[in-house]
Amino acid sequence: MSRQISIVILNWNAADDTIRCIGQFAQWQQIQPQIWVVDNHSQDDSVAEIARACPHAHLIRNQANLGFAGGTNRGLQAALAAGEHPVLILNNDALVDEAAIAQLLHTLTEDRSIGMVGPLLYHAEAHDQLIAAGSHNPVWHLQNLIKTIPAGQPIYEVNYISGSVALVRAEALQRVGWLDEDYFFYTEVADWCQRARRHGYRTVVDPQARAYHNLNRSAPARNALYVYYLIRNRFIYIHKAYRQSRAVLRLPLYAFWTLYSLLLTLQLRVKGNDARAQAVHLGLIDGLCGRWGGQNERVLALCAQAAGATPA
């Protein structure tokens, strides 16, 4: 079994988290990781700090914020150009030990039909709190995270796994292609796994491996922007995934998520949460009108305006 992997970590104004994340590999004995850090046009001193603290990491400097999809793609492309090893996509606020990655590597190596494998994901500050055991189809479920672990299965197939900790087969990336940058942030991994199934690859969770994600560190970014992309990207997914033989499902899915978004907007306005209501409304309009890609500055400005605040 190959003991070499590439690790792709995305950084955006969070050098401390990225440096801490890289530090967890220092004690690894058997797996030899090549580390690729992609800085997504940070506005602080992240690049200098990471370069100084982690001179062994390959540092890619993007000239614009390309989102999770675009930023991760730059790392994936660089990693595969350097060697066709499995690639671990890892959030900089995620924790995973060598034994867990060794288990994921074993699973990926033993079954060539697996394109992507992930661990059980737990909360970093409450190790018994399960965040996700995989995910359901994002347009068929309001809450798509799987919260129960199937009993008696060494591995099990899911619609997609979290991009926080995901081990990908290099060959699958070459055949399926990169993450779709139209999504910018959120749902791009679901889209990739859906495309991978067309090529015969499965996405699985190995419950013998655990990882931990610190959701509190990214909580400020999970307000207006998270809500906006959560709503908008479901429409992108419907547009891209439901074609040809599945096209009959497009209209009902569009109708459901339109009604859901309108009702959620109304509910949030009644509660006085005007910023989140505006984020949902913008996600709905942009999703229906095909305004894709990164919309951070515009969404933040309009949400701040709706809340009667000055945008940061």
Image (cartoon, rainbow, N blue to C red):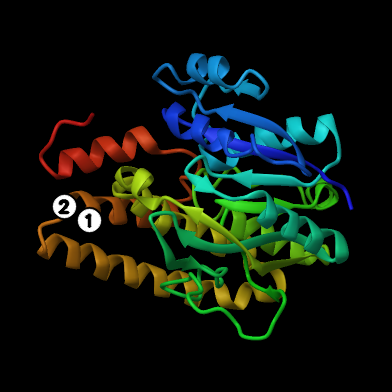
CA–CA distance in space, label 1 to label 2? 5 Å
Instruction: Please indicate whether residue 115 sits to the left or right of residue 275 in the image.
Output: right
Find out whether the residues at labels 1 and 2 contact each other: C-beta distance under 8 Å.
Answer: yes
Q: Which residue is mark 2?
A: 274
Identify which amino acid the numbered label 2 is placed on. Asp
- Residue 196, position as x, y percentages in the image: 75, 60
Circle 2 — which element? helix
Q: Is residue 112 visible?
A: no
Instruction: Please indicate whether residue 136 sits to the left or right of residue 245 in the image.
Output: left
Query: Residue 234, relative to residue 89: is it above or below?
Result: below
Q: Identify the mark at residue 120; answer none if there is no mark.
A: none
Circle 1 — which element? helix
Residue ID at (57%, 77%):
249
Q: Identify the mark at residue 277; answer none if there is no mark.
A: 1
Instruction: Please indicate whether residue 215 sits to the left or right of residue 178 in the image.
Output: left
Query: Residue 294, relative to residue 60: is it above or below?
Result: below
Identify which amino acid the numbered label 1 is placed on. Ala
Residue ID at (51%, 29%):
19
- Residue 59, position as x, y percentages in the image: 63, 22
Residue ID at (63%, 23%):
60
Query: As rendered, which of 298 and 50 lies closer to the eye?
Result: 50
- Residue 124, position as x, y percentages in the image: 43, 54
- Residue 63, position as x, y percentages in the image: 54, 19
Q: Is residue 58 visible?
A: yes
Residue ID at (81%, 47%):
170
Q: Residues within 10 Å of mark 1 (few under 14, many from 20)?
A: many
- Locate residue 128: give its quadrant: bottom left
